Amino acid sequence: SQQGEEDPQALSIQEGENATMNCSYKTSINNLQWYRQNSGRGLVHLILIRSNEREKHSGRLRVTLDTSKKSSSLLITASRAADTASYFCATDEGNFGNEKLTFGTGTRLTIIP
Amino acid sequence: NAGVMQNPRHLVRRRGQEARLRCSPMKGHSHVYWYRQLPEEGLKFMVYLQKENIIDESGMPKERFSAEFPKEGPSILRIQQVVRGDSAAYFCASSPLRTDTQYFGPGTRLTVL
């Protein structure tokens, strides 16, 4: 598997339900970030979690990081139709951290109204 | 504070022509990154630049591709003698410091006929 690989590749849920996406990576990291990409658009930064953090919240988003398992999860609570997008995790590989991000292939999330 | 600007948003070139993609970072950001995204894939790192310096070009193809970030003006990604395989979305990101979150532009979608 690649560095920063998301699981599942696609997810469809009813509006109001919670959505959970997972990301696995291989090498040591300084931080891990989650981005959202609407179809045909640029990436929107959602949240950054550093290697010494285990959990972080931002609004309806909750991110966990388990460095022993080299994995992270993104939870979106009370999903809305506007959450329909592709979600990518990105890990840093630079010597000083963060200059070279490695992205997975993403999870395509569809919220059914 | 305007976000990262990229132009053009869409670019069509015939095989053998040159493509020039421009990126204006956010105000106050002196670090610029270029990524390429093929359909249904995640972003792949190409190059990291600071003003007048290429810091990391490990993701750049050895031939036909070049990047610059002059003291004045936008960063330019230049692709000479384009081929069909160069068709992709090219994203630019910027950050104020080396270890900060990267903010992405809307991308330039290059189509090579």
Image (cartoon, coloured by chain):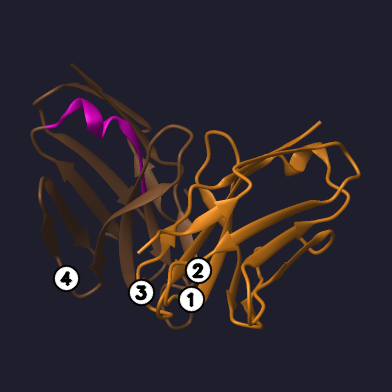
Instruction: Please report the bounds of the magenta region as a residue range.
Output: A79-88
Image point 76% across, 59% down: which residue? B78
Q: Is residue A57 above or below residue B41?
A: below
Give the number of the disc on residue A100: 2
Colour representing chain B: orange
Disc 1 is placed on an element classified as: loop
B88 to the left or right of A112: right
Q: Nearer the viewer, mark 2 or mark 3?
A: 3
Which residue carries the number 1 mark? Answer: A94
Cα gap from disc 2 to disc 4, whole angstroms: 21 Å
Cα gap from disc 3 to disc 1, whole angstroms: 12 Å
Cα gap from disc 2 to disc 3, whole angstroms: 11 Å
Q: Nearer the viewer, mark 2 or mark 4?
A: 2
Give the number of the disc on residue A53: 4
**First along the sequence among labels 4 and 1:** 4
Colour representing chain A: brown
Q: Is residue B72 above or below residue B85?
A: below
